């Protein structure tokens, strides 16, 4: 490859990265909100169900472990002073036995505390992830239209996982360290107020310096999460589109693009972890200053008979225990910032409300006949860009309606509104005279079946994929649905028949086979309204001929909407509706529209010419 071609490819890659970065920043903006402790009140809601059962045990173990830890240095100091004063060896053994007993109690309390906090933490993470997933399932199509799948995936996996340490160890460790610090400060001041106050001088210094890092660390970890979201989005896109990538030999360009994102993520992580690591040197320097004050001033107090050697040893141990929780709190603060960034992103999704929402007074839609009416419907995906412009259409129960038009004419928008995947901007959609916005969404969609051109096959057996249309269907009903659409023969020929395992998206099946399974799935649901969105586009002519016979029986008594370009699929429809730029320009049956010699006539003639040229 020439240098000029290399430079052009590099420029294209940079431009693509820049575009993608602008898109993802729009989706995952770095939040400039202040450190919000209200987030933890929201997280505490997930702990509440387990508060009565497990928290009392955790708190008791925490208090018991902290008290025993605080008593040990005091007993050691008294034991040293007892030896120095020449008291009996029996008293020394008493002190040693008491210290050993305290260590055993401390070990046992820590063991049970960790066990119970892990139980609470895992249950809280389970509930949070479950709640987030269930909430996302209820969100409207508009939510997914503006977010790549990887961005949604990273919230449910990485962001929830980042809260795991906070719930299993973080919160309780923060409480333990805070209680321990307060206890040590009280003991130090009670043992010798002069030396205690001298050591405390270093605490404000450490606090002021570390506070300066707060915003930088928080923003750094938000940036890391955002870049990880970008990587997940690109990975999902690359795996889904690997055939296109290899077909157009764009592997090098794709790898270069991923390398750019991966490098950006590494740099962001280096910045975040580097800021985290500034805490340890800060604590060590501050601790060193405190230790210098302790020995220098402590030696002076011993010389002036204001302190014993045993008391100084107790001070040394307490100060060691004092810097230890401060060091942990510094590291926990960094973990807290990571968790805060993740919790903000999680609650951003949880706070997202469906744009298609049920009214409080919504009632279940009764079993419908299938009368459908579009009443002067206007719809905009984006404000100022209408996809449908004042569409009105009456369809009687049992009628079949074919929607015809060029790409972008509004055909798919039509059925999206009928299924209430989106709400109309103006006008109304009525079924049996009832506005679909006034009924429960599930009761509507359970009576509307849809087969899409881009069908989706889930991992599992073919039987399970068909049964997805109605989970309580028997095996016999599953097979009857497959026979009705002409799928039974090819399924029966598979090694395990209906129990054949298919991978994600059904890659072991042909496109036509996947569509037939999707068709059987929709028919098994026994909908009153059936929508076929280019459902026969990838089925060969022979297979289509088979299902045309089945459709005559299956569509009898059902209202159906058919989006198709094949004449054989649409010419038998009771109504043919021709759409152009979101408006109905022609309407009638096949013969009427052919006599009109308008847009529909032109589309059919173009199809004939295409078939003649293909032959």
Image (cartoon, grey):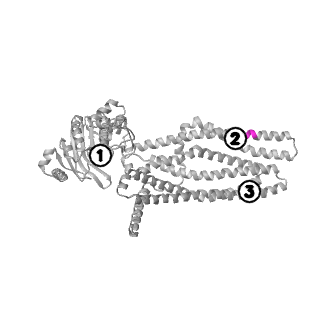
Of circles 3 and 1, which is in front?
Answer: 1
User: Which residue in the structure is indicated by mark 1?
Assistant: 453
The x, y position of residue 228, in whole percent, is 48, 54
Residue 181 part of the magenta segment = no
| Other-residue count near label 3 (Cα within 10 Å), few / some / many at <14 / 14–19 / ≥20 | some
Which badge, 3 or 1, comes first in the chain's sequence?
Answer: 3
User: Which residue in the structure is indicated by mark 2?
Assistant: 106
The x, y position of residue 399, in whole percent, is 21, 38
Q: Secondary structure at mark 3?
A: helix
Q: Which residues are magenta?
A: 100-107
Residue 18 appears left or right of 550 = right
The x, y position of residue 615, in whole percent, is 18, 51
Which of 335 and 214 lies nearest the eye of the viewer? Answer: 335
Q: Is residue 272 above or below residue 539?
A: below
Q: CA distance from mark 3 to mark 1?
A: 73 Å
Q: Is residue 353 visible?
A: yes
Q: CA distance from mark 3 to mark 2?
A: 26 Å
Residue 104 part of the magenta segment = yes
């Amino acid at each position: 490859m020439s240098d000029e071609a290399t430079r052009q490819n590099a420029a294209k890659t940079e431009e693509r990265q820049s575009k993608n970065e602008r898109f993802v920043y729009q989706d995952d903006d770095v939040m400039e909100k202040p450190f919000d402790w209200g987030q933890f009140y929201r997280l505490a809601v997930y702990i509440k169900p387990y508060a009565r059962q497990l928290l009392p045990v955790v708190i008791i173990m925490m208090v018991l472990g902290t008290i025993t830890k605080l008593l040990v240095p005091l007993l050691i100091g008294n034991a040293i002073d007892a030896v120095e004063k020449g008291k009996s060896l029996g008293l020394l053994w008493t002190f040693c036995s008491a210290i050993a007993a305290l260590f055993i109690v401390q070990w046992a309390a820590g063991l049970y505390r960790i066990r119970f906090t892990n139980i609470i933490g895992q249950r809280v993470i389970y509930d949070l992830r479950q709640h987030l997933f269930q909430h996302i399932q209820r969100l409207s199509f508009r939510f997914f239209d503006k977010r790549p799948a990887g961005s949604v995936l990273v919230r449910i996996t990485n962001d929830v996982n980042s809260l795991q340490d906070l719930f299993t160890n973080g919160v309780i460790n923060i409480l333990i360290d805070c209680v321990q610090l307060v206890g040590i400060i009280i003991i130090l001041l009670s043992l010798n107020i002069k030396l205690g106050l001298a050591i405390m001088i270093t605490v404000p210094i450490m606090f002021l310096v570390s506070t300066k890092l707060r915003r930088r660390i928080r923003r750094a970890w938000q940036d890391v999460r955002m870049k990880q979201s970008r990587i997940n989005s690109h990975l999902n896109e690359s795996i889904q589109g690997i055939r296109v990538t290899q077909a157009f030999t764009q592997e090098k360009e794709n790898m270069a693009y991923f390398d750019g994102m991966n490098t950006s993520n590494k740099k962001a992580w280096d910045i975040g972890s580097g800021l985290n690591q500034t805490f340890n040197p800060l604590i060590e320097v501050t601790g060193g200053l405190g230790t210098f004050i302790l020995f220098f001033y402590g030696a002076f107090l011993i010389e002036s008979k204001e302190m014993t050697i045993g008391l100084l040893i107790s001070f040394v141990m307490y100060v060691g225990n004092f810097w230890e929780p401060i060091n942990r709190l510094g590291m926990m603060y960094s973990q807290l910032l990571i968790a805060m960034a993740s919790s903000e992103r999680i609650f951003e999704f949880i706070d997202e409300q469906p744009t298609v929402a049920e009214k409080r007074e919504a009632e279940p839609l009764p079993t419908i006949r299938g009368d459908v009416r579009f009443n002067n419907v206007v719809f905009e995906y984006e404000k100022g860009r209408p996809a449908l412009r004042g569409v009105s259409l009456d369809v009687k129960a049992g009628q079949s309606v074919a929607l015809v038009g060029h790409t972008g004419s509004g055909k798919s928008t039509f059925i999206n509104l009928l299924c209430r995947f989106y709400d109309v901007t103006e006008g109304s959609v009525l079924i049996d005279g009832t506005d679909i916005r006034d009924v429960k969404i599930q009761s509507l969609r359970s009576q509307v079946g849809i087969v899409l051109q881009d069908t989706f096959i889930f991992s599992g057996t073919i039987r399970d994929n068909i049964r997805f249309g109605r989970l309580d269907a028997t095996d016999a009903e599953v097979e009857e649905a497959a026979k009705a659409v002409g799928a039974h023969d090819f399924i029966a020929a598979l090694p395990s028949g209906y129990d054949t395992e298919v991978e994600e998206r059904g890659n072991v099946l042909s496109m036509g086979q996947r569509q037939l399974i999707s068709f059987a799935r929709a028919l098994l649901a026994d909908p009153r309204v059936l929508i076929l969105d280019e459902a026969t586009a990838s089925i060969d002519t022979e297979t289509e001929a088979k299902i045309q016979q089945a459709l005559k029986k299956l569509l009898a008594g059902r209202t159906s909407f058919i989006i198709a370009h094949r004449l054989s699929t649409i010419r038998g429809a009771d109504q043919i509706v021709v759409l152009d730029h979101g408006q109905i320009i022609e309407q009638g049956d096949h013969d009427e529209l052919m006599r009109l010699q308008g847009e529909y006539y032109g589309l059919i003639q173009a199809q004939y010419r295409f078939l003649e040229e293909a032959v």
